[in-house]
Amino acid sequence: MTTDTPARLLQLLSLLQTPREWPGGELAERLGVSRRTVRRDVDRLRELGYPVQATMGADGGYRLVAGKAMPPLVLDDEEAVAIAVGLRAGAGHAVAGVDEASVRALAKLEQVLPARLRHRVSTLQAATTPLTSGDGASIAPETLTVMASTVAGRERLRFAYRAKDGSESRRLAEPYRLVSTGRRWYLVAYDLNRDDWRTFRVDRVSDPFATGARFTPRELPTGSAAEYLRQSIHGRQDAYEYEVEFAESVDFVASRVPAWVGRPEAVGSARCVVRGTSGGPMEWLAVRLAMVGCDFVVRRPEELLTCVRELGGRLSRAGCL
């Protein structure tokens, strides 16, 4: 019998979060209490915001239903490990759809995981190999979670950074947001060493350390972190603008291109145009355009058109071998 009321409520909540209906008698037996106590505990959960539905009759019971807001979840060891492994696997690559919210969830979960479960998560991830490695460079999940926690906690961050030319430096920054482009993660932060706003590629960050020093967030020069990142990429010397027309509908192309490529705009019932700016390898963009799975024409720049033609030629020659 569970005499500690908070512990009993957590145990009851854990049972109700299993997607089934629990007869009152079975809950009472599981908890080692009377049916009357089960009814009182259910009322307490409702007061805390958990939408527990009761059905009357001999076959009646209790079940947790969807509410207006998501209350805290109670996870057992296996469930916590499964969620952590899934989030870590997705966070290691900037896969489209795995955005800052996913990293924040991982940071919160790993913060409360007992040491024995953190070890199980690390062991399981180290023992498995994904079939695909995503579109971008690999990132240690710990790097993302440390950054996410400093963003949420408004805490200054120290880290080592490797620039594009290979030079290395130590940085102290006030992290503002993590932004995923679909291929890579970026940190938008105020660099205290440079006394200015900067964007950092997370795959070039190492040894991130939360200093514990709090700060009041500064106002970005632009409206959002995503817009600031776009302008930062656009202003790079190696950045280039492109325009590509696809012989398919907007819906078809939108379902095939990641967000970092661009948002398609209709130019007819069965054609659309995608415009964007990239600072990444032109060869990779050419491959990604070909992966859309329909005919397309590169409107600009000429260098991208040349790259696509060369890629097409290599693929044609490969098919004749």
Image (spheres, rainbow, N blue to C red):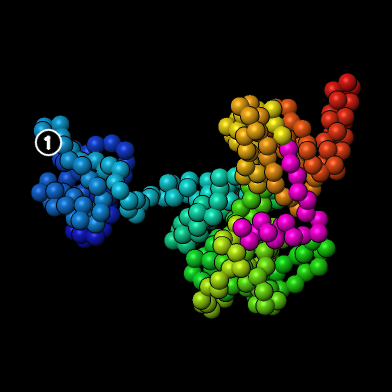
Location of the C terminus by quadrant is: top right
Residue farthest to the front? 268
Please give the name of the residue rendered at 61% of the width and 68% of the height, measured from the top-left corner: 221
Residue that mark 1 sits on: 56
Q: Residues within 10 Å of mark 1 (few under 14, many from 20)?
A: few
Q: Residue furthest top?
A: 320
**Considering depth in this image, is 207 or 8 the residue closer to the camera?**
207
Could you say where residue 35 lies in the image, as x and y percent from the top left? 12, 46
Q: In the rendered image, is residue 116 in sight?
A: no
Q: Viewer-proximal residue, 5 or 88?
A: 88
Q: Name the element at disc 1.
A: loop
Q: Quadrant of residue 238?
A: bottom right
Task: Give the image location of residue 184, x and y in percent.
Answer: 66, 52
Q: Is residue 230 magenta?
A: yes
Q: Which amino acid type is marked by label 1?
A: Met
What residue is at 72 percent from the left and 34 percent from the top? 245
Up/down of 191 relative to 226, above or below: below
Decide if residue 39 is on the left or right side of residue 198. Answer: left
Question: Does residue 302 lie above or below 222 as drawn?
Answer: above
Q: Residue at x 75, y 72 (%)?
A: 169
Is 91 in the magenta?
A: no
State which quadrant residue 177 falls in: bottom right
Query: In the picture provided, is 22 more to the left or to the right than 121?
Result: left
| Residue 240 higher or lower than 168, as above or below | above
User: What is the x, y in percent for residue 116?
Assistant: 48, 57
Q: Which residues are magenta?
A: 227-244
Question: From the viewer's perspective, is 153 left or right of 273?
Answer: left
